[in-house]
Image (cartoon, rainbow, N blue to C red):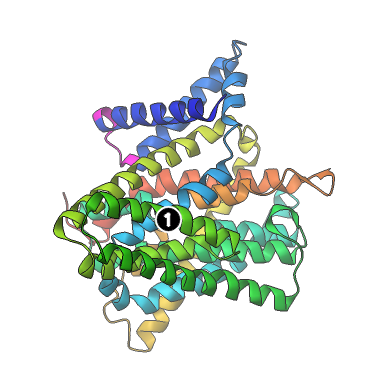
Amino acid sequence: MTLFNLLAGLIGLSAIFSYLNYRFLKLPMSIGLMVMGLAFSLVIVLLGAFDLGVHDQARGVLMQVDFNETLMQGMLGFLLFAGALHVDLNDLREQRTLILLLAVFGTLLTTLLVGAVLFFVLPILGITLGWWYCLLFGALIAPTDPIAVLGILKKLGVPKSLEVQISGESLFNDGVGVVIFLAIWSLAGLGGDHGGELSGGGIAWLFVQEALGGALFGLVIGYFGYRMLKSIDNYQVEILISLALVFTGYAISMWLHLSGPIAMVIAGLLLGNHGRAFAMSDTTREHLDMFWELVDEFLNAILFVLIGLEMLILSFVGEYLLAGIIVIAIVLLARLGTVALPVNILRWRGKGEDLPRYTSRLMTWGGLRGGISVALALSIPVVHNGAPLAERETIVALTYIVVLFSIIVQGLTMGPLLRRWGVVGES
């Protein structure tokens, strides 16, 4: 099947599912699309019982879509740039201490906690997963995805500070999570597409190169884009410049082995704040915002449909259901610990007076896992050193179960829980 036909099918399904969700289900768009993708997958699987060949054909088509490459080297740069473009830097600055603690130390601590507990719990369930693979799972499940929950928070009218905390952390911990994943991959000596084995010094340099290098590169391309926008007043050309900034900036950062996600966040913040204030006319601001909101919605629609459709490929998920339920609890408890620790430290030091009592609970339940986790899990090779990598199946299955629970259960219960905790009034 050609690339055009694949895109036509995905966009067609996304449009149909979006219409049905808006008209009938009335769920938050990202959640509704994934639920319908899952339902569609289950229908295809059931049709396979009648030996009509539909299941095998649909599975074959979907296997042509490289989820990891589609997200990590395609959608992610656009999604992060679009998200950062609409974040107010002043609001972000007010919450910078908590956001940095959560995005950097919280992500690292979650990785270690989940990995360590998993290493001791899984053998009790009869599942063998080595130490490095447990840490690898911890790294890919640590980053949070704000997409599904932010729409709910805005609709319910939660305090702006909480929106900024959740979105700010998620924008930065995607890049941090990918760097930690690569570091663990290298320490484990797994090689493959993610690179070879590194020493301790090499790991430190990897963090500096990827994270700090990505941030500096984002500043450079963001400033370059700002100067270009400032020198003209034509919204069509300015939108094209912003689009080229993401395309070329992400490609160059990957080529230079810098963190593309971090670079796009920094560039988006610079253009969305400094560029918006000093380099854009009112007409340009209006059209640029509309364009990137559309890009954001369009790519998110395809992403969540793809997550739902992945069930066609991951036929082994059911075998790990019990383990998945236990892992969900482990991930949530680790998240609660890594959120409560910095929140209480800030309060103890007298810097957390503006943090409501429900901050830890809200950021734990609102810290959804999404496309990044699935993409990193699917990036693990099927074969390593000429032999099948059995650990991959376990990691992919557990990741998928956690992501499904996170988006569907946590996403759909956010509203009732916020009302119960008194964050918002009854609607």
Q: Nearer the viewer, residue 153 or 231?
A: 231
In the picture, the quarter occupied by the N terminus is top right
At 47% across and 74% down in the image, what residue appears?
216
Magenta run includes residue 24: yes
Q: Position of residue 181 (x, y in %)?
A: 62, 61
Q: Is residue 409 above or below residue 276?
A: above
| SS under mark 1 | helix
Q: Which residues are magenta?
A: 23-29
Which amino acid lies under the numbered mark 1 shown in the image of this protein? Val
Q: Is residue 344 above or below residue 173?
A: below
Sort mark 1 into few (<14), some (14-19) or many (20+) by Cα contacts within 10 Å.
Answer: many
Q: Nearer the viewer, residue 237 or 374?
A: 237
**Identity of the residue drawn at 30% across and 75% down:** 355
Instruction: Give x and y (percent) for residue 246.
Output: 42, 55
Tell me if residue 152 is in the magenta stretch. no
Residue 368 can be seen, yes or no = no
Give the quadrant of residue 278.
bottom left
Task: Name above or below for residue 159 compared with residue 16.
Answer: below
Residue in the picture at 54% in, 72% down: 213
**Compared to 390, does 246 lie above or below?**
below
Residue to which mark 1 is pinned: 246
